Amino acid sequence: MFRFIVLIALVAGSIYAAPTNDKQSLRDSTDSWRYRYHFQHVFTDPSHSKIFAILNIKADAVIFLWGDWRGLKFENVTVEPLQSKINCPNPLLRMMTVETTPEVYNPIVTTVVKALEIPIRFKYSKGVFTKIKKHANDADESVNIKRAFLSLFEFDFDGLKGNASRNSSLYLEKNVQGLCKTNYIFTKDPIVPQQINVIKTIATDSCIVSPRTQTGLIMTPKEDSCKPRLNMMEVTTTIRYKINNTESDFIIQDAVSESRYNLLLSIPSEGSMVLSLNQTLRFIRKIIRSAPATEPKVPISLISEVPSHSESPFLPEDVIKKIVPMIRGDIQAKNVNEIIMLLERLDVQNIKKIWSSTESRRNLVVDMFTKVDTKEMRVFWIDNVITLVTKYANSTSDLALFQSPDRALMETLLGALKTARLSKEAMQQLSLKIGAYANKFSVLLETLDKQIRVGDKLMEQAQQSMRKDQKKLKDIEEIWQKEKENKVLIMTNLTSSLDKVLEVILQTHVIDDTHKIKTLGNMGYNKTLPVLMDMIRNRRQPTITRMQAIDALRKMPQSNIEEIQKELLQVYVRPSENAELRAKALLVLTKFPVSQSMIMALILTYQHEVSSYVGPFAYKYLSEISRSKFVPLKKMSVRAEKVLTSVEPVLPMMLKEKMSIPYIYEDGHELWSRMSSLLVWHFSASNALSLSSAAMDVQIIPGVIVNRTSISIRVRSSSLANYDDVEVEISAPYTLKDIVNMVRLYDR
């Protein structure tokens, strides 16, 4: 049984009973307003940080008069089964969900639930709740829940009144950051809201700044002694309302609420983890009858149903009525972005209505439609792809760039390649765009393959670490097996689509070799690799064709890098090859992680062909690759200490002076980047430069003497984008091989 402590309270739905008077059930009150409230509360166990749980509660929230104050308490509280989740570095463990019956709740959770019936007092003025007071027996977590409920009713009513006429609809967007600041956007139009300057601070006794796990995230006290293990990185809530302003009251007709909680949980024994919680709610209509003048006004009531990500308070008809005139008129760039966002909420029928209503601005409409990545828009393009490729061929690039992988859309594009009456040039251009779209399939295929391999490895770790809990282990194995089967099914469909693309491209004789090679390169599919390799190896092929095949290797999956490097290195070190072809091979090699064999190839080339085209090109590569971002590590890691131990005896010989190094830079990606890191590191330490403000470049420049090189450093010590050459030039009268050997020590 876990000892849970509150992390965060999330509003999750249901206020549906109309306000009623309930004088008998409320002590010291004469009037009350009752709402049915369904919410969620998230708990975590401080002694076992990998466990957190979601508690679902339903209750009647009652607001009442309490002398000069107002009060809030919960009645008829019912608790649903507790969902326990495991938050662990092993994602397979995170997938575990266990329901616990209310009878086995630990005492802390029971105390929180019982304390909901204890009322809190507060003041209400100008749409803001202030001076919240809790009873001595009340629990902090229950106060958090009550405060979250009150936040739904906080509005800037002066702004509402000033932006709405009677018997009309008003659209309101309420943006809350950390429940501290609220920004309102009012408009009488469902889209293109005009922001007015209304920013208020909710004057609570405490505010969400740096919360403690003991008190959750709402109303966290600001105490000097508070040393939070939980830091809030971001908490934002956006609610979009559609409100009717009647003669008697404001009526919320519709609203969508989206909340984002990003938390950083630091555990001394386990490091840190980031927990992100997203909540989307949709509220539906509720009518409020105005209370008599003698009664206190509880301004707005909400009612909610099942959370939905796709709902919008703005009806499609309202959107169409607005954006069609905008498209026909003098549209601005910002309006285009707003229209694209609204198009994402429309179904196929309403998309077709806009299409048929804007024929005079069809180029603009096509430009926007191709950038909307929704299932509905892809269905529309499947029906209209012939029109797209014949009349608006240039926009096909946006279709390939913005649309998610869709098997039906890919098959439609391939069908257009075979059946549409296109010129040879148009067919070749379409093949390139099909290849670019296929690349999304290849990337997803590679990602899923990696996820399966990682998942299998994690499963092996779980089998070792959970041997004593066979029941949970069995549950995890079943969950992973189902997840793995889903991924394999998706991979099968992706592979089928890519195989079809490869077959069509190779068999379409209208497409010339140049465009076929470029299309295969755009695909980035591992099954295109043998075709491209055969072209590279075939020395009877024209040089330009072989160069194009080499260039087409850029997008190949990471799993094929070793094979690609091996082939390109053979081309690069072969003296009889064309120098331009060898340069192209080296250029493509620089796009992949540097290997030891590649460094040796550079050395061999330099020693034998100092005056050739490839020799200077190798130096150019080294110079470019050394210009990288360096991340200062204020505290040396174990590996950094080993690096320091191995490098310290070498650098003084090279730089002819004693080193004193308080910091270390470690890039960790490419061998030559790490070499330049060492030099910059030494230079900044020797010249007492600020590591936070100085930006440096290392250039490797060919020496005048054969087999000699020099290293120069330039530094920019301000935020301006100009460099000043430092009056110190560090020369290294060693061969390139000597430098490589020094870097190898660093790389151990």
Image (cartoon, rainbow, N blue to C red):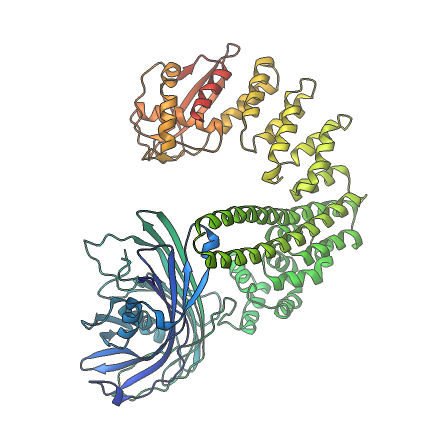
**Residue 626 in view (yes/no):** no
Residue 403 in the image: x percent, y percent? 61, 55
Would you place residue 591 above or below residue 14 in this image? above
The front one of 702 and 485 is 485
Q: Residue furthest right?
A: 509
Compared with residue 725, is residue 13 higher up or lower down, i.e. above or below? Answer: below
Using the rendered view, name the quadrant where residue 348 is placed: bottom right
Q: Nearer the viewer, residue 479 or 150?
A: 479
Q: Which image quarter is the C terminus in?
A: top left
Quadrant containing the N terminus is: bottom left
- Residue 337: x and y in percent read 52, 58
- On the image, the x and y values in percent for residue 306 come to 47, 73
- Image vertical order of residue 610 relative to residue 667, above or below: above
627 left or right of 491?
left
Residue placed most toward the observer, 744 or 87 = 87
Height in image: 46 above or below 299?
Answer: above
The residue depicted at 49 percent of the width and 14 percent of the height is 735
Q: Which residue does the image show at 62% across and 52% down from the upper left? A: 398
Q: Is residue 505 left or right of residue 662?
A: right
